[in-house]
Image: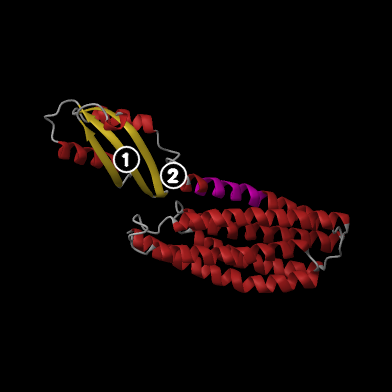
């Protein structure tokens, strides 16, 4: 099932990549001809989007490789690396947009409103299609989330460019171009920061945000009478969907069947917490790690 999800997600990313890459060229030309920072900023964003979507597609491809002697857990974590890089690239884009906007405030430039409006409208349609394709993918997959955020940023950029073009056409107020560029940059920054922190949390082997480890330990002890105590619990994920766990389980007496207890604990972890890979160390006396 995970293989089917990854194949479906990869197809979505590839289609979005083709759409974004093709229109990026159009938007660069339109930005140069119209003199619009909003269009050029969006084109710069689309350039990074193209690279980000390519990276996401590569990540899905690499993650399908089976484990080997060097990477015994396999290559699924590559998706998280791609999401982290994509988040950082979004932050760099925000910095570039803000720098260019400041330059426009200092030295205003004329913008050709009609050209800007036509290109921005076409860009909006392309981005809506690309975002719809990605949005129907796996919403818990950080790689898909990162790709969708890039395209969502483009979509917002196109909306801002359309608004700026209409204002310029009817009022001639050129300052609206950098103002709306900054507004879009702030929205992109917020989403990028969430993506970076979430992917960094996975890379740092953090436990899932939703999991209460103490409550999980209490539940296992309460449900399984043979378990006296649990300690040395470590929970992390190769991805947010592929959770791993290790723990020490101390039994109430040495007559209990360790294999049966391990099966019961693993079953509870899988059923109630979605933890599919767990390593359980059974103890009937003091913990070996305490000397």
Q: Residue 202 in the image: x percent, y percent? A: 46, 47
Q: Residue 91 in the image: x percent, y percent? A: 64, 53
Which residue is under mark 2?
205
The answer to which of marks 2 and 1 sits earlier in the sequence is 2
Q: Is residue 44 found left or right of 128 in the rendered image? A: right
Boundaries of the magenta span: 187-199
Q: Residue 45 in the image: x percent, y percent? A: 66, 62
Q: How many marks?
A: 2
Q: Residue furthest front?
A: 291
Q: Which image quarter holds the N terminus?
A: bottom left
Element under disc 2? loop
Q: Residue at x 24, y 42 (%)?
A: 267
Q: Nearer the viewer, residue 201 or 111?
A: 201
Q: Residue furthest left?
A: 255
Q: CA distance from mark 2 to mark 1?
A: 13 Å
Q: Which image quarter holds the C terminus?
A: top left
Q: 267 above or below 18?
A: above
Q: Nearer the viewer, residue 3 or 226?
A: 226
| Residue 236 is a magenta residue | no
Mark number for residue 68?
none
Question: Dot 2 surroundings within 10 Å: few (below 14), some, or many (20 or more)?
Answer: some
Q: Residue 116 in the image: x percent, y percent? A: 76, 67
Q: Residue at x 51, y 47 (%)?
A: 200
Looking at the image, can residue 175 be seen? no
Q: Residue at x 77, y 62 (%)?
A: 37
Which residue is under mark 1?
246
Q: Is residue 27 found left or right of 56 in the rendered image? A: right
Q: Is residue 209 found left or right of 242 in the rendered image? A: right
Chief secondary structure of the magenta portion: helix
Labels 2 and 1 touching (C-beta < 8 A): no
């Amino acid at each position: 099932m995970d293989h089917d999800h990854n194949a479906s997600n990869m197809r979505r990313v590839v289609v979005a990549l083709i759409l974004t890459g093709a229109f990026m060229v159009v938007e660069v030309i339109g930005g140069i001809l119209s003199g619009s920072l909003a269009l050029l900023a969006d084109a710069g964003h689309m350039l990074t989007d193209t690279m980000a979507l390519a990276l996401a597609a590569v990540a899905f491809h690499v993650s399908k490789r089976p484990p080997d002697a060097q990477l015994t857990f396999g290559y699924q974590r590559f998706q998280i690396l791609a999401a982290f890089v994509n988040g950082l690239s979004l932050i760099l884009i925000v910095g570039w947009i803000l720098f260019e906007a400041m330059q426009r405030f200092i030295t205003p430039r004329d913008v050709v409103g009609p050209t800007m409006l036509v290109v921005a409208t076409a860009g909006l349609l392309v981005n809506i299609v690309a975002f719809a394709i990605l949005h129907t993918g796996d919403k818990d997959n950080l790689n898909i989330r990162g790709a969708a955020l890039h395209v969502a940023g483009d979509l917002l950029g196109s909306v801002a460019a359309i608004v700026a073009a209409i204002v310029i056409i009817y009022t001639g107020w050129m300052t609206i171009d950098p103002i709306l560029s900054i507004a879009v940059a702030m929205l992109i920054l917020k989403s990028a920061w969430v993506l970076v922190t979430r992917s960094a949390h996975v890379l740092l082997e953090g436990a899932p945000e939703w999991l209460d480890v103490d409550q999980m330990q209490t539940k296992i002890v309460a449900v399984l009478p043979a378990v006296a105590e649990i300690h040395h619990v470590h929970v992390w994920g190769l991805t947010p969907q592929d959770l791993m766990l290790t723990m020490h389980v101390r039994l109430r007496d040495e007559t209990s069947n360790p294999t049966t207890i391990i099966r019961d604990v693993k079953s509870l972890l899988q059923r109630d917490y979605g933890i599919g890979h767990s390593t359980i160390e059974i103890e009937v006396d003091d913990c070996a790690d305490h000397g």
